Image: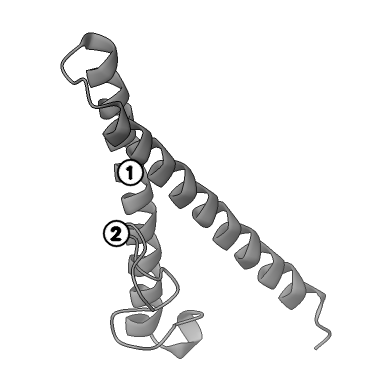
Amino acid sequence: MKEIGGIANPMSSPSGGVGIGAAEGGGESAGFMESLKQAIGQVNDAQLQAGRAVDALMTGESQDIHRAMVALQQADISFQLMMQIRNKLIAAYEEIQRMQV
């Protein structure tokens, strides 16, 4: 999958597989958690970069409103993506909880 705005597909692990739980082995599960942490870190970085761009505009350090607006939009879209992934993970967890054994 092609990267959008520096955010890679957070659901794929570096090893090529997606680990679901500890029952599959520590390596796969750790890969999924690391991918998730990395994606959240990238969203946080985008938010911080947008904040710095706005601060630079407000203090007069920068006159480039277009870069600030692009940074704000990238931060907004990456945050929305993160929230949708969170919603999908919660829905999947709730579906697993409803399964009868």
Toward the left, the furthest residue is 61
Is residue 65 positioned above or below 13 on the image? above
Q: Residue at coordinates 40% horizontally, 74% vertically from top-left?
A: 32
Residue at image mark 2:
6
Q: CA distance from mark 2 to mark 1?
A: 9 Å
Q: Is residue 20 left or right of residue 93?
A: left
Q: Which mark is residue 46?
A: 1
CB atoms at circles 2 and 1 under 8 Å apart? Answer: yes
Give whichever of 57, 42 is nearer the camera: 57
Helix, strand or loop under label 1: helix
Q: Is residue 85 left or right of residue 51?
A: right
Give whichever of 18, 51 is nearer the camera: 51
Residue 101 pos. (x, y %): 80, 88
Q: Which mark is residue 29?
A: none
Q: Is residue 53 left or right of residue 91?
A: left
Residue 64 pos. (x, y %): 23, 27
Q: Residue at coordinates 56% horizontally, 62% vertically from top-left?
A: 85
Is residue 83 positioned above or below 52 on the image? below
Helix, strand or loop under label 2: loop
